Amino acid sequence: MNASSSPPDHDLPDSAHDRGVIPAGFVSTGSLPDPEHVQTLVDEAHERFRSNDEGSLSTVYPALQRASPDGFGLCVVAVRGELYATGTADVQHSIMSVAKPFVFALVCDALGPEEATRRIGANATGLPFNAPEAVVRSADGRTNPMVNPGAITATSFIPGASDEARWETLLAGLSAFAGRSLSLDEEVYASASATNTVNRQLAGLLEERGLLGCNRESALDLYTRQSSLAATARDTAVMGATLAGGGVNPITRRRVVSAEACRHTLAAMATAGLYETSGDWLGRVGLPGKSGIGGAMVTVSPGKGALGTYAPRLDAAGNSVKGQLAASFLSRALGLDVFASAPAAAMETPLA
């Protein structure tokens, strides 16, 4: 990945220093290898990991138990629109927590990224995705938009004069990320609504602290609906590539959110996208990612593209086992890792 820096900080006027504003400059860019090589590597990732039977289906909502445990789909989408898929990449499944970064991006556009972060929070909790302790231990109840309490808060700020208007805005925004109309999985929605006791507790804690943008019942229902949308690995790859491309959908070529909303969203994903294992993930994969208990994952390489995976067997933290393995392999094989670098040949000297 190629990058160069903005003008030096000391050249900024005092007012820009105070606001933390950096003038527009060069940004992360790059490209994937040639198309045939990318498809070969995507196929290889599927072949390497498809027989892995570690992990188990989520028991959080009864409807999630209906998934085929051996399903495994992968899709890579470049910011210029090239698409590489294999396995069950077109099998629909509930998006669950993979909706979180895209909802946060929409809220960043609605409120402004700084205001959205001020209201929702940004720091990792180090706790499981639905832990009420994250709210209780926080000095002001704020957490991070990639864990359930922060995500419920984020969803509560989706604009709209009524519950249905907010849902229509949210559905339209997530569909724009996917480049097609998404639909609700009614069975998953009914199952989650009947058994979301922990999320109901979280919504109550957030309302007590005055953090929600609407009443807790509306926020909880809207959050449950967004989590119950049906999507495919192809969809999540396109959605991730929209974040990678500064907010422009690589298939429709339509702008969905601002580049600055994407930047803040990717930072939140890097911080807590895989919950309490996010640090381990960054060390292995070197990219912002987001997992969901339905088996979906999205991994984003800014300026290049994204990987969407579907594999419903989860580890103890609720993250897709095969999705993580595929992301780790393809991050290195495709040159996506934002932390990987090599010295310029002319600068390298032998070790003493």
Image (cartoon, grey):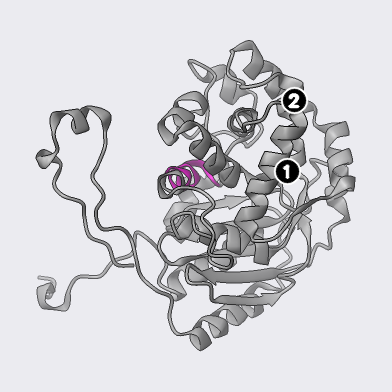
Q: Are marks 1 and 2 in contact (CB under 8 Å)?
A: no
Q: Which residues are magenta?
A: 264-273
Q: Which residue is mark 2?
A: 218
Quadrant where the N terminus lies?
bottom left
Q: Residues within 10 Å of mark 1 (few under 14, many from 20)?
A: many
* In-image side of 92 versus 351 (left or right): right
Residue 331 pos. (x, y %): 47, 67
Quadrant where the C terminus lies?
bottom left
Task: Classify 206 as above or below 341.
Answer: above
Q: Magenta stretch containing residue 267, yes or no?
A: yes
Task: Classify 96 as above or below 196.
Answer: below
Residue 52 pos. (x, y %): 70, 69
Cα–Cα span, label 1 and label 2: 14 Å
* In-image side of 186 versus 339 (left or right): right
Q: Which residue is mark 1?
A: 227
Upstream in sequence: badge 1 or badge 2: 2
Location of residue 15 (image quadrant): top left
Which residue occupies 87% across, 44% down?
Answer: 62
Which residue occupies 70% across, 33% down?
Answer: 166
The answer to whether any part of residue 318 appears in the image is no
* In-image side of 247 versus 195 (left or right): left
